[in-house]
Image (cartoon, rainbow, N blue to C red):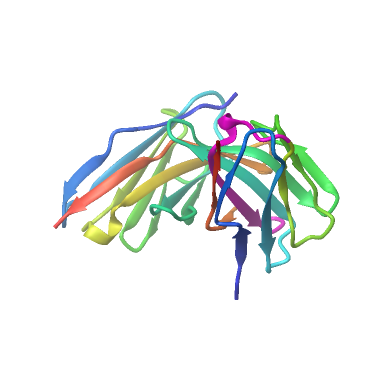
Amino acid sequence: DAGITQSPRYKITETGRQVTLMCHQTWSHSYMFWYRQDLGHGLRLIYYSAAADITDKGEVPDGYVVSRSKTENFPLTLESATRSQTSVYFCASRGTGKETQYFGPGTRLLVL
Amino acid sequence: SQKIEQNSEALNIQEGKTATLTCNYTNYSPAYLQWYRQDPGRGPVFLLLIRENEKEKRKERLKVTFDTTLKQSLFHITASQPADSATYLCALDYNAGNMLTFGGGTRLMVKP
């Protein structure tokens, strides 16, 4: 009964490196979301996906890439990490026709 | 774009008292509004949802009101306990429910 999991939970990387954050859910939810949470900004949506192979931009998509080849996985890639991408990243999912989102435990990313 | 305001200052109350948190929003009124709880180092957890045609919703010690004229939601915790100490986030639907816009959250501290 894993629900929604994220990996890694903590990551330290350097400016310019590519980083991929993983998100996996076991509910077969159609919708999946990536947020970042920063002090003073709250949760901001980066990308979301309504189904496999369907993705769309959120409020702050620049510098990020997503894919969704399988319903249960929604990886987020920082193609060339910048210090401004230091943040806590949360993945979430919800079922079709449902309003409640279920969040993962988060990935704390530090870009040096 | 939709803007959501929650009191960024922490709310400190005594155990047994009622805590009242405020969520104000601008622009259009959403079809529904949600409240989430977030504990340090963890992802948000859904608490309550209230729709635009509902004025009040209750769940155990929790009560949410929704005033579309004032563009405000109030979140009450009655008979508060130290275990209620957390950050509480309000969220509004955006883009026909495909996305949620979150407020910055209010930290509640309940002292024994």
Between A4 and B102, the residue placed more toward the observer is A4
Instruction: Please indicate, yes or no, whether residue A89 appears anywhere in the rendered image.
Output: yes
Q: Is residue A74 magenta?
A: no
Left or right, A84 with respect to B5, comes to: right
Which quadrant of the figure has residue A26? bottom right
Residue B81 visible = no
Q: Nearer the viewer, residue A71 or B4?
A: A71
Residue A99 x, y percent position in the rendering = 61, 52
Q: Is residue A32 left or right of residue A102?
A: right
Residue at image position (38%, 52%) is: B40
**Residue pictured at 69% horizontal, 39% vertical:** A17
If the image is split into quadrants, where does the N terminus of chain B sit? top right
Quarter the C terminus of chain B occupies: bottom left
Q: What is the span of residues highlighted in magenta in the rendered image?
A: A80-98
Does the magenta-highlighted stretch encompass residue A86?
yes
On the image, the x and y values in percent for residue A65 come to 76, 40
